[in-house]
Image (cartoon, rainbow, N blue to C red):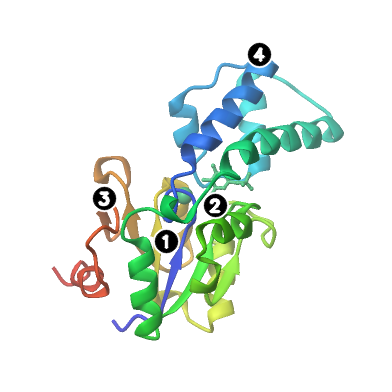
């Protein structure tokens, strides 16, 4: 298989913002009197803001009107931005900047496929906005991962077919989304916690495009 394009998730693949999301959701959950654990946060990786709020409300047995839900999502995002706003270029996860530059030099197309509505801001802070040929994020999609919409839109923006693209994902919901869309997936994180990816790498440090391709022909 000759791959034409790569699609990167943002949170947990390019930058480690999961801790910020945890602090922000935890603060909101506390305000609502709902217990919120690291396990809950794991489950919410890749899940949109609205679906994450719905999960917390379900957990607490709370039924709220749409206007209140909007206010709560704004409040969570304010908590989140207080932390994420401090993101700097050095916060890009080890090796990812080099790989993005190598892909560009090799004319492999690159897209972002993220559920986050804060993606552009984070990429600006990382000084990585120019590294992407297309950005698809939470502002463009109507269906959250594990629906494949975000990756299908990203592939379309690049003019590539799903089987010609590798998706890099740290979340189970994202791996499921990519598989549902017919993409090849490389998991990023702990192999024992992720299923369905072609293979899983702990991160990009020291990994070139050739290393990534070798994983497909071990
Ligand atoms: C995903 C994160 O990338 O984006 C989730 O893994 C987050 O934790 C989701 O809820 C939505 O992010 P945001 O920035 O739009 O609230
Ligand atoms: Mg992620």
Taking the spot 56% from the left edge, 16% from the top edge, the residue there is 35
Instruction: Compute the Cα span from label 2 to label 4.
Output: 27 Å
Quadrant that contains the N terminus: bottom left
The location of residue 115, given as percent across then percent down, is 58, 53
Left or right of 2? Residue 69 is right
Which circle's residue, 1 or 3, is located before the other in the chain? 1
Label 1, ligand 2: CB separation under 8 Å = no
Q: Residue tagged by mark 1?
A: 179
Q: Residue tagged by mark 2?
A: 145
Between 55 and 5, the residue placed more toward the observer is 5
Left or right of 142? Residue 156 is left
Which circle's residue, 4 or 3, is located before the other in the chain? 4
Instruction: Compute the Cα span from label 4 to label 1.
Output: 36 Å
Label pair 2/4, CB-CB below 8 angstroms: no
Taking the spot 42% from the left edge, 53% from the top edge, the residue there is 90
Taking the spot 62% from the left edge, 23% from the top edge, the residue there is 27
- Determine crowd level at label 4: few under 14, some 14-19, many 20+ residues with C-alpha closer than 10 A: few
Q: Residue tagged by mark 4?
A: 33
Which circle's residue, 3 or 2, is located before the other in the chain? 2
Left or right of 79? Residue 178 is left
Q: Mark 3 falls on what kind of element?
A: loop
Label pair 4/3, CB-CB below 8 angstroms: no
Label pair 3/2, CB-CB below 8 angstroms: no
Q: Which of the two discs, 4 and 1, sits closer to the camera?
A: 4
Between 125 and 46, the residue placed more toward the observer is 125
């Amino acid at each position: 298989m000759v791959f034409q394009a790569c699609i990167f998730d943002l949170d947990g693949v390019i930058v480690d913002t999961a801790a910020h999301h945890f602090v922000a959701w935890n603060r909101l959950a506390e305000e609502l009197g709902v217990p919120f654990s690291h396990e809950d946060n794991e489950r919410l990786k890749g899940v949109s803001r609205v679906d994450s709020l719905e999960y917390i409300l379900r957990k607490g047995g709370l039924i709220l009107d749409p206007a209140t839900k909007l206010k709560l999502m704004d409040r969570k995002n304010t908590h989140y931005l207080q932390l994420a706003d401090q993101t700097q270029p050095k916060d890009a996860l080890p090796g990812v900047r080099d790989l993005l530059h190598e892909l560009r030099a090799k004319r492999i197309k690159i897209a972002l496929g993220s559920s986050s509505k804060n993606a552009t801001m984070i990429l600006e802070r990382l000084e990585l906005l120019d590294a992407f040929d297309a950005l698809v994020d939470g502002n463009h999609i109507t269906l959250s991962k594990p629906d494949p919409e975000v990756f299908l839109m990203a592939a379309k923006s690049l003019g590539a077919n799903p089987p010609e693209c590798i998706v890099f994902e740290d979340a189970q919901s994202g791996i499921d989304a990519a598989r549902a869309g017919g993409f090849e997936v490389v998991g990023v994180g702990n192999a024992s916690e992720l299923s369905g990816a072609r293979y899983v790498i702990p991160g990009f440090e020291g990994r070139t495009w050739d290393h990534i391709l070798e994983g497909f022909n071990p």
